[in-house]
Image: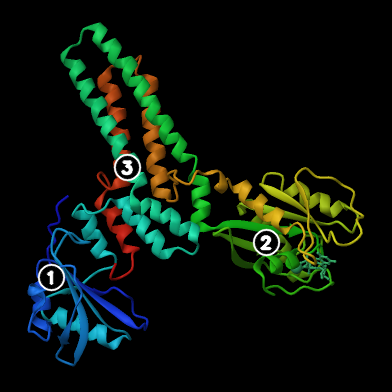
Amino acid sequence: MANLNQDTIVAISTGTSSGAISIVRLSGSNAIKIADQIFSTAKNKTASNLTPRMLTLGTVKTSAFNEQALCVVFKAPFTYTGEDLVEFQCHGGTQIANGIMKECIKLGARLATNGEFTKRAFLNGKMTLSSAEGMIDMINAESDAEVRAGFKLLSGNLSKLAFDAADELTDILSEIEVSFDYPEETIEFITKANVKERLSALSSKIGEVLKTAKAGSLIKSGINVLIVGKPNVGKSSLLNFLLQKERAIVTDVAGTTRDTIEDSFLLDDIKVNLIDTAGIHDTADKVEKIGVDKAKNLIKQADIVLFLVDSSRNFSKEDAEIFDSIQNSKYIVLKTKSDLETKNDKIFENEILISTATGSGVNELKAKILELTQISSIPADSVVITNERHKDALARAKQALDQAAENISADTLDLVSIDIKEAYNAIGEITGNTTSEEIIDAIFKKFCLGK
Ligand SMILES: Nc1nc2c(ncn2[C@@H]2O[C@H](COP(=O)(O)OP(=O)(O)OP(=O)(O)O)[C@@H](O)[C@H]2O)c(=O)[nH]1
Ligand SMILES: [Mg+2]
C-alpha cells in the first residue's frame, strides 16, 4: 500500500502535560524544508545540513519567541514513518512546544490526527497492523505483563505467524492451479491428500495460538476477581489485605458493606480487579438488598469467584445457598479467620485456609488465582492473543481451513480454493494486508496525538 497522502504533519509527541522536555515532531515531504526556516545552529547550519540521526543544538525562531532546542533529522525512507522526519526537543511546559508547532503550521504543515505518524508507518510498510496495535498496547499498559504482551506483538511474533501462514496458503493455491493443468486422476489424488494434510497442520497451529486468547484477554483487561460470602465472613478484610490499604470499612457488624467496592492490584505483574460485595443473605433493608442483588448478578461476569466461609463458625444454610449459586463459575473456597478455633468441619475440594490477621494462606490464594487463569502455563516465547480483532481473524481463518480440509475429498479443488482464499483473507487482516480502510482508520484513531 503506497502512501499517497504526502502532506507534512506536525504534533507535540510528548503530550500536553507539563514535563521537563517536549518533543515536536514533523513528518512528510516538506518536513526538512519547514525545519530549515525555523532552526539554525551557532555555525548557521540548518536542518538540511545536519548529520541525520544526530541531535544538534541550535535556536528555534518563532514569530513569538526564540528557544534553544535540539534538532534531529531522519531522512526517508529510514525513518519511523518512512517519510522525512524532524524532531525538536525543546524545553518542557506547554507554551514552548505549542509555539513551535504553530510556527510549523504557519509554514505549511498540518496538525496530525491521532496516530497519524504510526498510520503512515503502516501505510509505508514500516510496520504491520498488529505491530502497531502492540505498540499502542504498550503505551496504554497498566501492568508489566501488558507491556510484555504488547512488546511481543510489536516485535512481530504474531505477524510472522500470519506471514508464514499466508505464504503457505499461497503455495497451496498455486499448486491447486497447477493441478488444473494436469487433471489426470493420480496427480489430483496426490495433491488432494497433500493439501489436506497441510491445511490441517496449519489449522492446528492456529488452534494452539487461539488457546492463549482467554489468558491473553485477562492479561490485557485484568482478572476480575469477585469476593462473595455471607455477612461478616471477612470479605472486606481480604480486599484490604490484598490491596494493602484500608479501602473498605471493616467492622464486626454484619452487613457493613452495602455496595460493591472495586479496586485493583498487581499480582505477579498482572492486573487483578478485585470486587468486594455486600454479604449475601435475606434482608429487609432496602439498600442492603440492592447490594445483595448486585453481588449475585456479578457472579456470572467474574473470571474467578472467591467464596468465603468463616472457619470459626458452623457451615450454614446461607453458606450452602451461596455455594450453590457459584457452581457455574471458576471459584476458590476460602475458609477465613484460620487464626481462630475451627468450628466449620465441611471439607471442600480446593479449599484454602486463610487469615488476614496473620496473612497465612494468602500466597497460596495468589498462586491459585494465577493457576486458574492459565496465564502461568503460557510459555515465555509463545505468541499470546490479547486482541479481540486478532482472535476473531484467526478463528475465521481456522474455520475456513477446517472446512476446506473436510470438503477436499468430495469437492472439486476449485471449490476448496474458495475456502482457502477466505482463510488467506482472514489471516491477512492481522498484518493489515487485507484489512478494510474503515477498520484501519478505527484502529489508528485510538492512538494518541503525536504517535
Ligand atoms: N480473627 C480474625 N478476624 C477477622 C479476620 N478477617 C476478618 N475478621 C473480622 O471479622 C469481622 C468482619 O470482617 P469484614 O471484613 O467486615 O467482613 P465482611 O465479610 O466484609 O462483612 P460484610 O461487609 O458485613 O458482609 C471484623 O470484625 C474483622 O475484624 C481474620 O482473618 N481473623
Ligand atoms: Mg464487607
Residue matched to label 3: 160
Q: CA distance from mark 2 to mark 1?
A: 63 Å
Residue matched to label 2: 294
As drawn, 94 above or below 144: below
Badge 2 crowding class, 10 Å Cα cut-off, few under 14, some 14 to 19, many 20 or more, is some
Give the x, y percent position of residue 359.
76, 63
Ligand 1 has an atom within 8 Å of the beta carbon of the residue at disc 3: no
Residue type, numbered disc 1? Thr
Kindly tell me whether residue 404 is visible in this rendering.
no
Rendered image quadrant of residue 309: bottom right
Q: Residue at x 53, y 53 (%)?
A: 218
Which is nearer the eye, 318 or 13?
A: 13
Q: Residue at x 70, y 73 (%)?
A: 248
In the drawing, does residue 159 fall left or right of residue 221? left
Residue type, numbered disc 3? Lys
Q: Secondary structure at mark 2?
A: helix
Sequence order check, earlier mark of 2 and 1: 1
As drawn, 164 above or below 433: above
